[in-house]
C-alpha cells in the first residue's frame, strides 16, 4: 500500500442470540456457550500510513490513548511483527459503548485484519486468532463474523453453516446507562428472578434464544427486565432478550416496519432518551 492512501473498513456489531454460562473457571473467566451473529450496524475505521500510530474518534468520551482496544490491537500486532505499524486511524463510532454489542471487540479485530492487509504481513487466520484472543474473549468472532457458536471463554469460534442464510428484522433498545462485562459476571452470585419477568428459552425458526446473564443484570437494573416484557407484548415480536452483558435489549420482529414502530412506541411510552436501532441480524451481504 502506497503512502497517502486511506483504506476504509467496517466493523459490524454483534448480538448474542443465546448466551449460556456453564460454570466458573480457575482463571476467573466463565465457560460459556454462545450463539453469536453480526448486525448491519457497524463502526467505520479509516487507516492511513503515517509516521506514528495515532487514533482519532468522533465519539465524545471514547479514550483514544493506549487504553482503547484499537490501540491495544495495534500493539498486539506490533509485538508479533517486531516493528511499528505506523497507522493514523480514524474511528467513527455508530455502535454504543457498554451495550453488549461488541463494539470495542469488533474495532480491535478489524484493526488486526487491516494492519495485516495494509502492511502485507500475511499472518494466517490462526495467527490472527491468537492475537485476537489475547485482546478479549469476543474478539476472535469478528475476524470472520459469520453466525457462529462460541465456546471456551468465548474465543473458540465454530461457524454454524446451517444458519448461514437465516436472517431477521431486529430492533435494539438501549438505555442511557451501560453495563460492564466483568460487573455482569460478578453479579451472577446473589442474582434472583424478578416476578413477572420471563427468563426461559424462546424458540424462533428452531433457534433457542436464552441469556443466562439476564438474571444477574436485571437484579441490578430491574428496568431492563420490565422493558423486555414490554417488548414481548408488542405486535410482531417473535422473541425479546438482552444481548451479552447488556444494557441493550433486542427483539426479533416479523417485519422491519414492526421493528420501527416498536422503537417509536418505546420512546413515547417508556423513555424518550432510549437509543434505538432497526435493521437486520445476520444480514445478507
Ligand atoms: O475477555 P474480556 O476481556 O472481554 O473479559 C472481560 C471480563 O469479563 C473478564 O475479565 C471476566 O471478568 C469476564 N468474563 C468472564 N467469562 C467470560 C468472558 C468474560 O467471566 N467468558
Image (cartoon, rainbow, N blue to C red):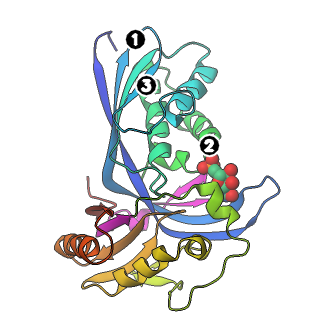
Q: CA distance from mark 2 to mark 3?
A: 22 Å
Sooner in the amino-acid sequence: mark 2 or mark 1: 1
| Residue at (32% x, 70% y) in the render | 271
Sooner in the amino-acid sequence: mark 3 or mark 1: 1
Q: Secondary structure at mark 3?
A: strand
| Residue at (50% x, 63% y) in the render | 246
**Residue 55: numbered disc:** 3
Residue 150 is a magenta residue: yes
Q: Secondary structure at mark 2?
A: helix
Residue 243 is a magenta residue: no
Q: Residues within 10 Å of mark 3 (few under 14, many from 20)?
A: some
| 60 horizontally vs 242: left or right | left
- Percent x, y for residue 121? 50, 20
Asked if the residue under mark 1 is in contact with the one under mark 3, i.e. CB atoms within 8 Å, the reply is no
Q: Secondary structure at mark 1?
A: loop
Of tags 3 and 1, the one toward the viewer is 3
- Percent x, y for residue 143? 47, 43
Magenta stretch? 146-174
Asked if the residue under mark 3 is in contact with the one under mark 2, i.e. CB atoms within 8 Å, the reply is no
Dot 2 corresponds to which residue? Answer: 133
Of tags 2 and 3, the one toward the viewer is 3
| 127 horizontally vs 10: left or right | right
Can the viewer see residue 22?
A: yes
Amino acid at each position: 500500500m502506497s503512502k497517502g492512501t486511506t483504506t476504509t473498513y467496517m466493523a459490524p456489531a454483534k448480538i448474542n442470540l443465546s448466551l449460556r454460562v456453564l460454570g466458573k473457571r480457575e482463571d476467573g473467566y466463565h465457560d460459556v456457550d454462545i450463539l453469536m451473529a453480526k448486525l448491519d450496524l457497524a463502526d467505520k475505521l479509516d487507516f492511513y500510513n503515517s509516521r506514528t500510530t495515532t487514533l482519532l474518534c468522533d465519539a465524545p468520551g471514547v479514550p483514544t490513548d493506549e487504553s482503547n482496544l484499537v490501540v491495544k490491537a495495534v500493539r498486539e500486532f506490533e509485538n508479533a511483527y517486531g516493528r511499528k505499524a505506523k497507522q493514523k486511524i480514524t474511528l467513527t463510532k455508530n455502535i454504543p459503548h457498554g451495550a453488549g454489542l461488541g463494539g470495542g471487540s469488533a474495532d480491535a479485530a478489524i484493526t488486526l485484519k487491516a494492519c495485516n492487509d495494509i502492511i502485507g504481513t500475511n499472518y494466517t487466520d490462526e495467527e490472527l486468532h491468537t492475537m485476537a484472543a489475547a485482546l478479549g474473549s469476543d474478539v476472535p468472532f469478528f475476524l470472520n463474523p459469520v453466525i457462529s457458536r462460541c465456546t471456551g471463554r468465548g474465543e473458540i469460534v465454530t461457524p454454524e453453516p446451517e444458519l448461514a442464510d437465516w436472517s431477521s428484522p431486529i430492533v435494539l433498545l438501549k438505555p442511557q446507562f451501560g453495563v460492564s462485562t466483568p460487573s455482569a459476571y460478578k453479579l451472577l452470585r446473589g442474582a434472583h428472578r424478578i416476578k413477572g419477568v420471563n427468563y426461559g428459552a424462546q424458540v424462533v425458526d428452531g433457534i433457542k434464544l436464552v441469556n443466562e446473564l439476564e438474571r444477574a443484570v436485571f437484579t441490578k437494573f430491574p428496568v431492563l427486565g420490565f422493558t423486555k416484557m414490554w417488548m414481548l407484548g408488542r405486535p410482531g415480536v417473535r422473541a425479546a432478550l438482552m444481548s451479552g452483558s447488556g444494557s441493550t435489549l433486542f427483539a426479533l420482529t416479523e417485519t422491519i416496519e414492526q421493528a420501527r414502530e416498536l422503537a417509536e412506541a418505546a420512546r413515547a411510552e417508556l423513555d424518550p432518551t432510549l437509543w434505538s436501532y432497526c435493521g437486520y441480524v445476520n444480514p445478507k451481504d
